[in-house]
Image: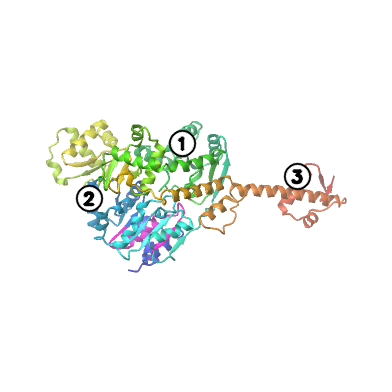
Amino acid sequence: MQFSSADIHKVLQKHWGYKTFRPLQETIILSILKGNDTLGLMPTGGGKSITFQVPALCYTSGITIVVTPLISLMKDQVDNLKSHRIKAVALHSGMTAKENRLAWELIINGNARLLYVSPEKLQNERFLLELRNLKINFLTVDEAHCISQWGYDFRPSYLNIKKIRKLIPGIPILALTATATPMVVQDIMVQLEFREKDHLFKKSFSRENISYIVRKSDTKIFDVLNILSKTSGSAIVYVRSRKRTKEIAEYLTNSGIPSTFYHAGVDNLIKTQRQNDWKLGKVRVMVATNAFGMGIDKPDVRVVIHYDLPPTLEEYYQEAGRAGRDGLKSFAVLLSSKSDRGLLNRRITEAFPERSFIKNTYEQICNHLHYSIGEGYDSVKEFNISRFCTLFEDQDEKKCRASLRLLGQAGYMQFIEDIEKRSRLKILCEREELYDIKFPNKVTENVLAASLRLYTGLFTDYIYIQESEIANNLKINNSEVYEALQILDKMKVVNFIPRSGLPLIYMPTSREDKTSLIIGKDIYEARKSLMQERTEAVIDYTFNDNSCRVKRMLAYFGEKEAGNCGKCDVCRNNKTTKNKNNVSNVLEDILSFLKAHPEGARFISIQSNINSEKQLLTETLSYLCNEGYIRFFNNLYFFN
């Protein structure tokens, strides 16, 4: 099937209301529609999702698979597509068996144009076999740098993507990422088994409207306040500590700058509310960990401040790039102190605990979750990491998290914090059967009726609900709503999945004896060496004041020929120093010239004998007159 530029413009106009594409979008879309394996490097805010959503809708039948690592982002995209009347479904490790069955029913019955899946799903052989029964138009790999062992966020579950190529030969792949070094770009193509290597479309990483600034600071909290007081518009302050998000937000609010905070531990409903308040301008500043920002497309962020040094330039570029998406002048400010260099190096040690500690952590978690050796394959259980570290005296939460990350990269267990924590509800019976239900009490009947009034789609899908919203509607307590929904669940009228604030442990394989675990060199030594290299790049960017910061950052991403940006703090300091030197030289030249011409000289005569721009010459002559070094009389300048 052949598609033209006019075809994709019709889809864009019909579903999104846009008349034109952003730079690079159309080129990438036409490439994947021609059946080419395609790699798109698009900076943060470049509109990656359009490059696979538009071509997915060009086909009159079949489905497009989208592999993405973030469950929350997956949920947001599916909801957003549904709001545009586009049929989309998500499958991930945080779903119940019933939710999975319903999702498959929608897919099989042709009620999905896009299928979002987490990479862990591709480890399930049954899931892969079920894909063979589908007509798949193309496969999209979002955050494609995760497939590269040289990528800063390598995920071994991504390596299973190539299994789809073996199951469905000839299927084209669209790989997308916002940040990748040249080595990572080549590795993405190798790992995804690109048939041709010439369909790489790359937009420059340069963001000319952003001024990148590093400020030396021993009192960061006061500098944050100072920067925000001297700038306007929305802002983000990134920190590495959950506790500090709250402290800084409260300090800024008390200082007259409306602020709120956000991190992975905040209740999901509260996170959504705070995110909306910030997007609508009800609060000016969002103080957050790196859990905030992915999928947030707020165009008028004027300032992004990094309170702590980021672990990699890739992360810094993505987070700083959330400033100025509307193309207007914006600032990315990185605060640094003398102790930051040591903190960065300590992170390397913290990120790689001893192998014996990692193996003990695996054994302790399996015991804690009641998995015997040989059990646990493809299962998911809630995991309270704080409680776990309290129960086991030799555990430290930082080292435990680091161990889980390495165990995940080695393919033994996956720690999932990025899960939807709201309650979910689905009606199990047919609509006409509702009239025959014998309710045990009036509250239960009213709760079901209110749920049907407040939420659409309950008969066909699991819908996220708020018990408080139902309670307010009925003027009863949250606990009464919860109890009524539990009763309805036991009656098989609904399937009620209560909200949970706990992360999950996903077991892609059965439990093994800890002595059999292999944390190989590619997972441990090689990645530790890579982290050291990335740390050195951040240190160089932060503490090297001798050359343009943007030029060095672009060189890190492979743009070796980039010139000085002229806007970073280094370029500005060099320009100021140069101007001061120029003024000093011009000043001396003027005085020497007028000393040699006691009869006086006209401006045109001075200009023709002194090498200087007219404006600088005029300003210097005015300065010398004001200070009494020279005088101006009858259109002539004289030396006093």
Q: Which mark is residue 623?
A: 3
User: Reading the chain from its start, which is encountered first: label 3 or label 2?
Assistant: 2
- Quadrant in the picture for the C terminus: top right
Q: Residue furthest front?
A: 515
Closest to the observer, 376 or 99? 376
Q: Amino acid type of disc 3?
A: Tyr
Q: Position of residue 126 (x, y in %)?
A: 24, 54
Residue under the image location 57 percent in, 35 percent down: 218
N-term-proximal mark, 1 vs 3:
1
Range of magenta residues:
36-64
Q: Is residue 607 left or right of residue 465?
A: right
Of marks 1 and 3, the one in the foreground: 1
Asked whether 52 falls inside the magenta stretch, the response is yes
Q: CA distance from mark 2 to mark 1?
A: 42 Å
The residue depicted at 36 percent of the width and 42 percent of the height is 359
- Foreground tag (3 vs 2): 2
Mark 2: which secondary structure? Answer: helix
Residue denoted by label 1:
259
* The quadrant where residue 562 appears: bottom right
Give SS at disc 1.
strand
The answer to whether any part of residue 162 appears in the image is yes
Q: Percent from the top left, x then y, of residue 601?
A: 83, 53
Q: Amino acid at mark 2?
A: Arg
Cα separation, mark 1 vs mark 3, equals 45 Å
The residue identified by callout 2 is 101
Report whether 379 appears left or right of 399: left
Say few, some or many: other residues with alpha carbon within 10 Å of mark 1 (under 14 / 14 to 19 / 20 or more): many
For marks 3 and 2, give the CA distance. Answer: 81 Å
